[in-house]
Amino acid sequence: MPTLFRAALGALLCISLFAHPARADEEAHPSIAVADWRIALFQSKAAEEEDQRMQQENLELVTRATELEQEIEAKGRSLEKDQAILSEEEKIKLQTELGRSAREFEMLRFRLQQIQAEAEARFVASQREHIDQAMKTLADRYGLDFVFERQALVYGRKVRNLTDELITELNKLQ
């Protein structure tokens, strides 16, 4: 009887080891992919729409910054070209105007950068659920165990890059 029990136990052990070789292999070698969710998000249709909305919303600031930039270039050329014929007083006046325009331009440029950074942060936060949902859809589709940020993976022999597919999934969700 003990011999029969050992034989049955041995048979069960062999069956369990060899019946699911793919599963044992999957556990030994997890399925990994990478994605750059930031690139995918900012190449999505929602990002295009948000960019257009932000351009419209800040058109006045952008227009003023462009005007100032052109004004600075024109005054700089004028100062350079007419330097020999301008009086000292005219030179100082032109340099003062140039400095004032340059400061205003820098303030506007800084303000626009702030607005853009805040808008990007709000946009990312508003799209977080879509990103997670799209990533899960792709992980389920390909039976992935792990999806890493593309920059976080130093080396991988067979690693799928999901960034382009993530753009497609994000566009479906929006």
Image (cartoon, rainbow, N blue to C red):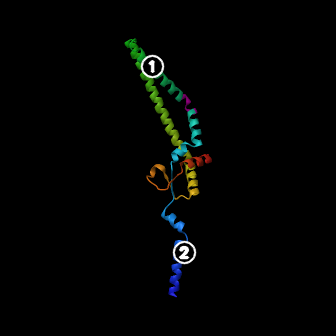
Label pair 1/2, CB-CB below 8 angstroms: no
Magenta segment includes 59: yes
Q: Which residue is mark 2?
A: 15
Q: Amino acid at mark 1?
A: Lys
Q: In the current view of this chain or complex, which residue is farthest to the bottom?
A: 1
Query: Residue 33 placed where, x, y %?
Result: 51, 54
Task: From this view, report whether residue 89 is shown above or below residue 70.
Answer: above
Q: Residue at x 49, y 23 (%)?
A: 70
The disc, 1 or 2, on the residue closer to the chain's N-terminal end is 2
Image quadrant where one finds the C terminus: top right
Q: Residues within 10 Å of mark 2 (few under 14, many from 20)?
A: few
Magenta segment includes 26: no
Query: Residue 78 placed where, x, y %?
Result: 44, 17
Q: Which residue is mark 1?
A: 75
Query: Residue 85 placed where, x, y %?
Result: 40, 11
What secondary structure is the stretch in magenta mostly built from?
helix
Q: Which residues are magenta?
A: 56-60
Numbered disc in front, either 1 or 2 = 2
Q: Nearer the viewer, residue 171 or 89?
A: 171
Task: From this view, report whether residue 23 is shown above or below residue 33.
Answer: below
Q: Nearer the viewer, residue 98 or 156?
A: 156
Q: Is residue 83 left or right of residue 65?
A: left
Separation of residues labelled 1 and 2 (CA atoms): 86 Å
- Element type where label 2 sits in the image: helix
